[in-house]
Amino acid sequence: MLEKLRNWREWLTVDRVVDLVMDAILLFWEVITSPILIVMRLVRYLLGAYVIGGLKNKITKLIRWLKTKPIWVSFIVAPVAVVILYYTLIFIWLAGEMLKPEMWKEEITDINR
């Protein structure tokens, strides 16, 4: 217990405390100024947690299933699975790019251009 407290005190420097406080203030300010970001971050988190987790689970099940089948089945199923995985990852990447909070902030445009 004392060892953890000592490690914590060594890690807790003035620079790190200032960084943590500034990050908290900026995050708080960002959330207050545009509440849609909360929803967007939740959607991105759920997308990452459940879709990627589910994808890993499906790949693991496919590999275990292929271990019990003859080799010729692997030669047919594996390329199809790789193509499906490729397009699934592209879809996940595009959905993640679309849900970036930076895209949803209001852009300030100069009217006098």
Image (tube, rainbow, N blue to C red):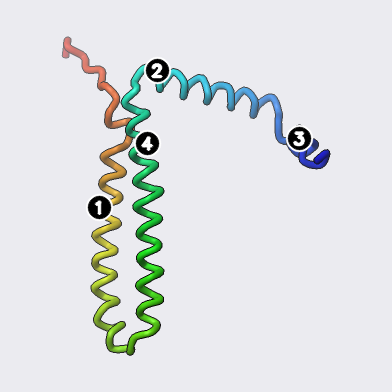
Q: Amino acid at mark 4?
A: Leu
Q: Residue at x 59, y 27 (%)?
A: 20
Q: Foreground residue, 63 or 110?
A: 63
Crowd tier of the residue under label 3, counting other residues whose Cα lies within 10 Å: few below 14, some 14–19, many 20 or above: few
Quick one: label 2 or label 1, which is nearer the N terminus?
2
- Three-letter amino acid code at disc 2? Ile
Q: Quadrant of the N terminus?
A: top right
Work out whether mark 2 precedes mark 3 in sequence or the reverse, and give the earlier one: 3
- Going from N to C along the chain, the mark reached first, 4 or 2, is 2
Q: Nearer the viewer, mark 1 or mark 3?
A: 1
Read off the residue under disc 2.
Answer: 32
On the rendered structure, is 10 left or right of 109?
right
- The mark found on residue 42 in the picture is 4
Q: Position of residue 39 (x, y in %)?
A: 33, 31
Crowd rating for badge 2 (residues with CA inside 10 Å; few <14, some 14–19, many 20+): few
Upstream in sequence: badge 4 or badge 3: 3
Say which residue label 3 marks: 10
Q: CA distance from mark 2 to mark 3?
A: 33 Å
Which residue is disc 1 drawn over? Answer: 91
SS of the residue under disc 4: helix
Q: Nearer the viewer, mark 2 or mark 3?
A: 2
Q: Cβ–Cβ below 8 Å for labels 4 and 1?
A: no
Q: Is residue 57 above or below residue 32?
A: below
- The three-letter amino acid code for the residue at tag 1 is Phe
Do the residues under discs 4 and 2 have CB atoms within 8 angstroms? no
Residue furthest to the top: 112
Front disc: 4 or 1: 4
- As measured in the structure, the alpha-carbon distance from the residue carrying label 2 to the one carrying label 1 is 31 Å
Q: Residue 16 at x, y = what percent?
A: 64, 29
Quarter of the figure with residue 70: bottom left
Q: Specify few, some or many for label 4: CA neighbours under 10 Å numbering under 14, 14-19, or 20 or more.
A: few
